Amino acid sequence: MHVTAIIAAAGEGRRLGASLPKQLLDIGGRSILEHSVAAFTSHGRVNDVIVVLPPALAAEPPDWLAAAMRSPSVRVVAGGDRRQDSVANAFDRVASTSDVVLVHDAARPFVTTDLISRAIDGALEHGAAIAALPVSDTVKQVAPGGASPVITATIPRETIFLAQTPQAFRHEVLRAAIGVGRSGVEATDEAMLAERAGHRVHVVAGEASNVKITTAGDLELARQRTVSASARIGTGYDLHRLVEGRPLIIGGVTIPAEKGAQGHSDADVVCHAIIDAVLGAVAAGNVGQHYPDTDPKWKDASSIMLLRDVLRHVAARGFAVENVDVSVVLERPKIGPFVPEIQARVAAALGIAAERVSVKGKTNEGVDAVGRGEAIAAHAVALLRAS
């Protein structure tokens, strides 16, 4: 089975009031258009993608899209005066061997893999299918015009659905719909043209999150959503016995003390707690898995170096450390005089500014092994953001 996706992005988005075309505006570090295109290029059942752009933009696509076009599975075409003209231009580039053609508004950047799959399955089963949501509120029909519209009818809400995209069609169904549009019929979407061509269009379950960005308020909500989605938080904890004959190393700083932390590496509780917090934020295990005490390689290893090394696991998952907060629990000595240096060492290892590293000294008020001066512990929290 061959599936082609058409991404409709030839509009100017005037209602948004931005200086750039709406599809080029940024949400979460990527343009609206890039989010939408990526949803289809990464879908396992979509074979190729045709992006419809304004003529000037089609002549000089954004760098990320130009790079994607090096693959024959991604193409760009210039749009027309109306949405239906733009989709028709793209349909002319659809291979005759394509079984299902999807049409999606670029202004819906949060379309999910499951929703795309439901639309494909709907087209395969029925010939034409659109994603749509049932309304939950009572629907009133009003007489147009006037400052205070008058209700003329109450419409049964079970008969009303709010259309979304993607809309999906068997190749021959969309061909007939495009033909109706080219005959002079105007429509707001391809489903309406398919209806006018005599085809029954079925509904598959849409998603409330599949919002269309139309106004400045929509854009702001989308940006807030991507900020929250791109943040990860992890916690870490470490504890070591204190013994004579070992240096006390905290955050890469050697602190004068009668006892030091016992461990396979340099037993730096601050670094170990931060490593666990950072790894935890990206679900990448813990310090013991990556630097086991059974491996001679890590004997007496500098934990500051381990902290620097762990960043590669974070980067590989598309994240970077934003800030860390650490509490060191130790009866004596007091670490207050050494905190600025600890912050500087940890910050350098993480590649962030020192003001993004918080280190606090606490005691355990004489309670348990830490309180009796037999051990040192640290708790850490790390915030990561998509890089």
Image (cartoon, rainbow, N blue to C red):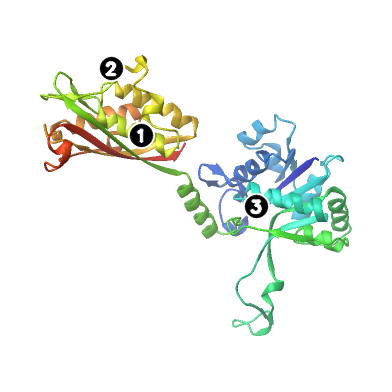
User: Which element is circle 1 on?
Assistant: helix
User: Which element is circle 3 on?
Assistant: loop
User: Which element is circle 2 on?
Assistant: loop
Query: Which quadrant would residue 248 be assigned to in this image?
Result: top left
Residue bearing the label numbered 1: 276
**As displayed, is residue 19 above or below residue 194?**
above
**As displayed, is residue 42 above or below residue 181?**
above
Point out the frontmost of discs 3 and 2: 2
**Badge 2: residue crowd in 10 Å (few <14, some 14–19, many ≥20):** few
Distance from the alpha carbon under mark 3 to that under mark 2: 61 Å
Name the amino acid, label 3: Glu
Q: Is residue 274 visible?
A: yes
Specify whether 336 is left or right of 9: left
Mark 1 or mark 3: which comes first in sequence?
A: 3
Residue bearing the label numbered 2: 300
Q: Are marks 1 and 3 in contact (CB under 8 Å)?
A: no
Q: Is residue 80 visible?
A: no
Name the amino acid, label 2: Asp
Quadrant containing the N terminus in the rendered view: top right
**As displayed, is residue 94 above or below residue 110?**
above
Distance from the alpha carbon under mark 1 to that under mark 3: 47 Å
Mark 2 or mark 1: which comes first in sequence?
A: 1
Residue bearing the label numbered 3: 12
Distance from the alpha carbon under mark 2 to that under mark 1: 19 Å
Specify whether 224 is left or right of 286: right
Specify whether 140 is left or right of 98: left
Residue at image x 70%, y 48%? 117
Q: Specify the farthest residue to the top.
A: 296
Residue at image x 42%, y 43%? 232
